[in-house]
Image (cartoon, helix red, strand yellow):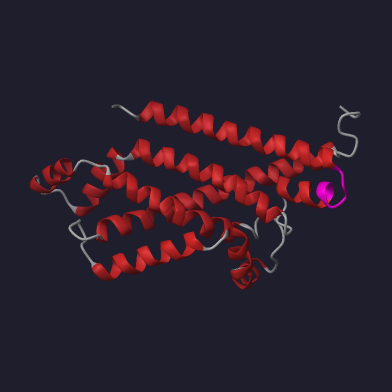
Amino acid sequence: MANLFPNINWMDLIFATGETLYMTLVALVGTLILGTILGLLIYLSAPGNLWDNKVIYSITAGVVNIFRAIPFIILIFLILPLTVFLFGTFRGPTAALPALILGSAPFYGRLVEIALREVDHGVIEAAKAMGAKSSTIIFKVLLKESLPALVSGLTVTAIALIGYTAVAGSIGAGGLGDYAYFYGFTRRNMDIVYICTLLIVIIVFVFQFIGDIVTKKIDKR
């Protein structure tokens, strides 16, 4: 191994892998919460739906579309003041979390909206006819019926997040992207770039594998 990868510090590589997993998992939790809220707001406030409200729909859909349109690397720079205000620095994996969440939550929000739209309206109408409250319809009907699609969408978002962590690493966020760029590419140590790429691919496959298993397990169709 030393002959194949002569420039790699294995402890540094393990630490960078841990940082990538930390950023991905924590940001994924934030994305799940914020993205689900955004998706629900868009769906519920859309014309003809439970909370039919043009103002809320227009604002929420507009915010989601704007953030989805901003390239992630530019988003990092745009929210630097917020990052520094929250953490006192823009470097390190924790400081990267706001950008990761704000970059991926709107994307997941749209996937949530699409999943909710696939729920049979007959089931919703039946719940209304039985006098179900809005909260019951949301949690017991909409989210429950769309759960396989929501998990599948979260898997896709997790994979996108792994890519985002690599981009964030190129400006000092830590993780495999940071290690590959600063210790590999800038110093012409291509063995570091190759091993970091391989590890990111493996992480992506693991997330996809877990997501597929969970989706199949909860999909009763």
Left or right of residue 165, residue 121 in this image: left
Image location (x, y in percent) of residue 136: 22, 48
In the depicted structure, whether residue 40 falls above or below residue 126: below
In the depicted structure, whether residue 22 falls above or below residue 1: below
In which quadrant will I find the N terminus?
top right
Image location (x, y in percent) of residue 61: 36, 63
Image location (x, y in percent) of residue 156: 49, 41
Residue lying at the far left in this picture: please name it: 129
Residue 64, by quadrant, is: bottom left
In the depicted structure, whether residue 181 falls above or below residue 89: above
In which quadrant will I find the C terminus?
top left
**Which stretch is magenta?**
183-189
Q: In this orientation, which residue lies closer to the viewer: 196 or 82? A: 196
Q: Which residue is drawn at 50% across and 48% down?
A: 29
Q: In this orientation, which residue lies closer to the viewer: 180 or 218? A: 180
Q: Residue at x 36, y 30 (%)?
A: 218
Does the stretch in magenta take in 12?
no
Image location (x, y in percent) of residue 59: 35, 69
Residue 42, by quadrant, is: bottom left
Left or right of residue 140, residue 122 in this image: left
Q: Residue at x 86, y 38 (%)?
A: 8
